[in-house]
Image (tube, rainbow, N blue to C red):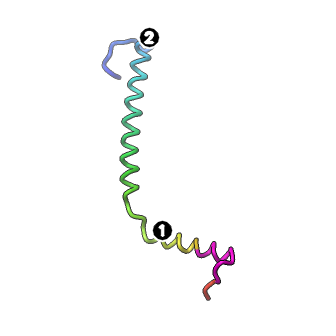
Amino acid sequence: MSGRSEKPGSPAGRQANAHDMLQSNTQIASKLKALYSAVEQQPIPDVFLDLLEQLDRAEKIDAGLVKPQP
């Protein structure tokens, strides 16, 4: 825990436990934000972009906006 001598069932003990949990959650949130930021900076793979283009073309064909290629 936090190295305090409060009893777990006492109000001070519950407050210390809540503080420890808040610190843990704050650390987890910071690490998740850093990870998300790093992933967000990575380029989109060409294979994925190609698949998105194929999907767009298929949707346009279904909507009658583009003729299918032979």
Does the segment drawn in magenta span residue 64?
yes
- Spot occupied by residue 38 in the image (x, y as percentages of width and height): 36, 53
In the rendered image, the residue lying farthest to the front is 65
Q: Is residue 41 above or below residue 20?
A: below
The front one of 37 and 24 is: 37
| Spatial CA span between label 1 and label 2 | 55 Å
Q: Which mark identifies residue 10?
A: 2
Task: Look at the numbered disc 1 and give the secondary structure of its residue.
Answer: helix
In terms of image quadrants, where is residue 17?
top left
Q: Amino acid at mark 1?
A: Phe
For the point 41% across and 27% down, the residue is 21
1 vs 2, front mark: 1
Judge the density around disc 2: few (<14), some (14-19), many (≥20) Cα neighbours within 10 Å: few
Task: Look at the numbered disc 2 and give the secondary structure of its residue.
Answer: loop
- Spot occupied by residue 30 in the image (x, y as percentages of width and height): 37, 40
Q: Range of the magenta residues?
A: 57-67
Disc with the residue nearer the chain's start (1 vs 2): 2
Q: Is residue 38 above or below residue 58?
A: above
In terms of image quadrants, where is residue 41?
bottom left
- Spot occupied by residue 34 in the image (x, y as percentages of width and height): 36, 46
For the point 68% across and 74% down, the residue is 63
- Spot occupied by residue 47 in the image (x, y as percentages of width and height): 46, 71
Q: How many marks?
A: 2
Q: Which mark identifies residue 48?
A: 1
